[in-house]
Amino acid sequence: MTMNNIDDRELISKYLCGDEKAFEALLMRHKERIYRFIYMKIRDKALSQDIFQDTFIKVVNTLKAGNYNEEGKFLPWAMRIAHNLVIDYFRKHNKVRLISESSSLRDDYNVFHTLKMEDENVQEEMTRVELEGQMVELVEHLPDTQRDILKMRIFKEMSFKDIAELEGISINTALGRMRYALINLRKLIDKHELVVHF
């Protein structure tokens, strides 16, 4: 059995028994998603790499200290660590995130924009970042086709033309799926009582 066929829990167990390759497999399995999660908030490649590395240093230290709770899944746990480091960054640098959906169907659209607002306090900044993290989680509840379109637009910043070609669909179909994805995302936001501005 290769490392790729072993679940996260067993990889962690092997790593704690001294198998470095087990952790390498765990890192390779989740690194892209965790890095994208960070980059989507920070929008700076070098800084995102730094926070990504800090995340895995904290992951390693927590695992070695025996403080990992096996009841939870590894990826959401690691994402929470990354999320908290992003909040720390915003707190230190007085930056906030604003979520805008107003131009979501244009090719220059980016769902997460960074703005600096001098008159917002740390609590408000953290609330905005927390909301963004919750929205990322809600995206996972969308139907596959809608979720995939949304991720290609947000995570990979692909144009609708490129998405259409990759998926083998028309641009209008891609636009339609994005529109439905946003409608369903709004419903999920209402259901979970998140306060965001579209």
Image (cartoon, rainbow, N blue to C red):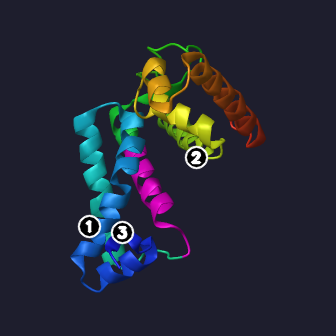
The main secondary structure of the magenta stretch is helix
**Image coordinates for residue 156, horizontal then vertical, percent:** 40, 32
Residue 112: in sight, yes or no? no
Please count the marks in the image.
Answer: 3
Is 99 situated above or below 79?
Answer: above
Name the residue type under label 3. Answer: Asn
Residue at x 51% of width, y 29% of height? 168
The mark nearer the N terminus, 3 or 1, is 3
Q: Between 68 and 73, which is closer to the camera in this rendering?
A: 73
Give the side of residue 61 with respect to residue 197, left or right.
Answer: left
Which circle marks residue 137 in the picture? 2
Q: In the rendered image, which residue does mark 3 sit on?
A: 4
> Looking at the image, is mark 2 or mark 3 nearer the viewer?
3
Residue at x 39% of width, y 50% of height? 34
Residue at x 44% of width, y 14% of height? 108
Q: In the rendered image, which residue does mark 1 sit on?
A: 24
> Crowding near pointer 3: few (<14 within 10 Å), some, many (20+)?
few
